[in-house]
Each structure stands twice: as structure tokens, then as C-alpha cells.
Amino acid sequence: MNYTTNSGFGGTVLGRISSNNAGVDAGVHYFKASKKFVIYALPSININNELLYSWFSILRFTPDLNKQWKLYSSLELFSAFSDIGHLSSVQRVRIGLDKKGNQFGLAVNLHESRYSASIDINPGLFFRKQFQ
């Protein structure tokens, strides 16, 4: 649940479920959007028993290439931490084209974990529909 003020800042309360745990987080977000870009950033903290905090952000840039086509680029970042330090991070990179809200192109997902010495890299294709 979000509430955003005219300045772009606001409060967020969210539920979180994973294979390891579940909980409720609260944070302060920043959101700004135009026809060409979106910025969303959310630092949050778990309000249950154990100390967990995270950072989630989305950066999108969609400039016009011509009257029908746009470039679509997106970066999503998520990092989770606890009292022992970094737990995991996920980065999702998308680069492609947009025509009438249909976005498609190349994708790469990266995952880093405190419990693994390697970075999981998952390349592929993506299709996304932007409803307006």
C-alpha cells in the first residue's frame, strides 16, 4: 500500500513472502514519472521480530526513436540485509523496443547471495505490455 505526495515522497507498507520467511515491511518511497522516464526507490525495514531491511528501485527510460517506436530500457534493483550483513541482491536489466505499449527485447537477471560464491546470470528475452 502506497501513498505518494506531490513531492514524489510517500509511505509504503507491504507484505513479503519468500521461501525462507514472511513479514510486513514499512518504508519511505520516492516516485517520479514522465512520458520518458520512471524513478521509484523504496528503502524499507521489516516490522516483525528480526531485523531485516531492503532497498528496491526501478529506473526506466523510454525516449522516442520516431513517431511509432521508442527505446525501452529498465533497471530493477533489490538488495536485502540483516544484522549479519548482505543477504541477497537481484538486478534485472531490460533493453529493447516499445511500440504502442508492447515492449520486447533482451533481458538479463542477476542474483547474488551471501550463501553462494557465484553470481547466477540468467539471460533471455522479454515481452511486457504497458497498459495506459
Image (cartoon, rainbow, N blue to C red):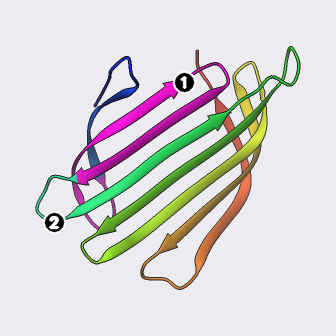
For the record, the magenta segment spans 17-45
Q: Which type of secondary structure does the marked residue at label 1 adopt?
A: strand
For badge 1, the amino acid type reads: Ala
Q: Which mark is residue 9?
A: none
Q: Earlier in the sequence, mark 2 or mark 1?
A: 1
List the single residue furthest toward the front.
7
Q: Nearer the viewer, mark 2 or mark 1?
A: 1
Q: Position of residue 75 (x, y in %)?
A: 61, 47
Quadrant including the C terminus:
top right
Residues packed near mark 1 inside 10 Å, few (<14), some (14 to 19) or many (20 plus): few
The residue that appears at 52% across and 71% down in the rendered structure is 112
The residue that appears at 43% across and 68% down in the rendered structure is 88
List the single residue furthest toward the left.
49
Quadrant including the N terminus:
top left
| Residues marked 2 and 1 touching at CB (< 8 Å) | no
Q: Is residue 68 left or right of residue 86?
A: right
Is residue 30 inside the magenta stretch?
Answer: yes
**Above or below for 87 versus 97:** below
Q: Position of residue 44 (x, y in %)?
A: 29, 49
Determine which quarter of the picture holds residue 60: top right
* Measured Cα–Cα span from mark 2 to mark 1: 34 Å
**Above or below for 107 versus 111:** above
The residue that appears at 66% across and 51% down in the rendered structure is 93
Q: Which mark is residue 33?
A: 1
* Residue where numbered disc 2 is placed: 50
The residue that appears at 42% across and 78% down in the rendered structure is 114
Q: Report the predominant secondary structure element of the magenta stretch.
A: strand
Q: Position of residue 98 (x, y in %)?
A: 76, 28
Q: Position of residue 100 (x, y in %)?
A: 74, 18
**Above or below for 38 versus 75:** above
